[in-house]
Image: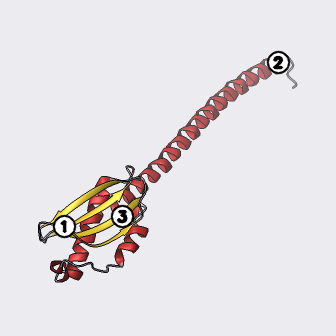
Amino acid sequence: MKIYSIIIFSTENEEAVNLTGEYKLSDFGFFQRGRAEFLAGVIICDNEYPQRVALSLLSKILDEFLGKFAQNTRKQQTISYSELKNYLIKYQDPKEADQIIKVQEQLDETKQVMNKTIESLLQRGEKLDELIDRSQEISFQSKAFYKQARKTNSCCTIS
């Protein structure tokens, strides 16, 4: 999973103007999101990158960009926004951009641990059942031995 590009455009006029962007291109797909404030953003990523994560990341970037450069977007000029490079590096792993994926991964790990624990408990229960069966068998054998010993000893009583 990779992000290849993050771009921010001004769409105030009929022609979109590329305000800033960061690129790392090869095989890709893309997601776009427009803004009422005459901005549009594009994230280009591979098919494995989750769509929901890409769109929420793009919304976050556009909000931050608009907060920082609200007045400059209407000048239709290229803007230096160095944070895009950091986003491009940091969010290569979708878990960094989306808490839901992070929580889902933790849940999956917890589920695996619980399954192993339940499995070991079941094995332990089986072993306990085997021990109970053996104990009962030994108890029956000891009773039979006791009865046989009484029979054998009854013929030869010493007084």
Q: Amino acid at mark 1?
A: Ala
Relative depth, front residue between 75 and 59 = 75
Query: Could you give the CA–CA distance between mark 2 and mark 1, rounded to whole angstroms?
Result: 108 Å
Relative depth, front residue between 138 and 22 = 22
Q: Residue shown at 52%/47% (left/top)? A: 117
Query: Could you give the CA–CA distance between mark 2 and mark 3, rounded to whole angstroms?
Result: 94 Å
Residue tagged 2:
152
Q: Residue shown at 16%/83% (left/top)? A: 71
Query: Is residue 39 placed above or below 49 in the rendered structure?
Result: below
Dots 2 and 1: beta carbons under 8 Å? no
Residue tagged 3:
5
21 left or right of 59 in image:
right
Q: Amino acid at mark 3?
A: Ser
Residue tagged 1:
16
Query: Could you give the CA–CA distance between mark 1 and mark 3, rounded to whole angstroms?
Result: 17 Å
106 left or right of 37 in image:
right
Query: Is residue 36 placed above or below 47 in the rendered structure?
Result: below
Which mark is in front, 1 or 3? Answer: 1
Q: Residues within 10 Å of mark 2 (few under 14, many from 20)?
A: few
Residue 130, percent from left and from top: 62, 32
* Dot 2: element: helix
Residue 32, percent from left and from top: 24, 59
Of the numbered discs 1 and 3, the one sitting upstream in the chain is 3
80 left or right of 111 in image:
left
Q: Residues within 10 Å of mark 1 (few under 14, many from 20)?
A: some
Dots 1 and 3: beta carbons under 8 Å? no
Q: Residues within 10 Å of mark 3 (few under 14, many from 20)?
A: many
Residue 116, percent from left and from top: 53, 45
Q: Residue shown at 17%/81% (left/top)? A: 75
155 left or right of 36 in image:
right
Which mark is in front, 2 or 1? Answer: 1
Q: Quadrant of the N terminus?
A: bottom left
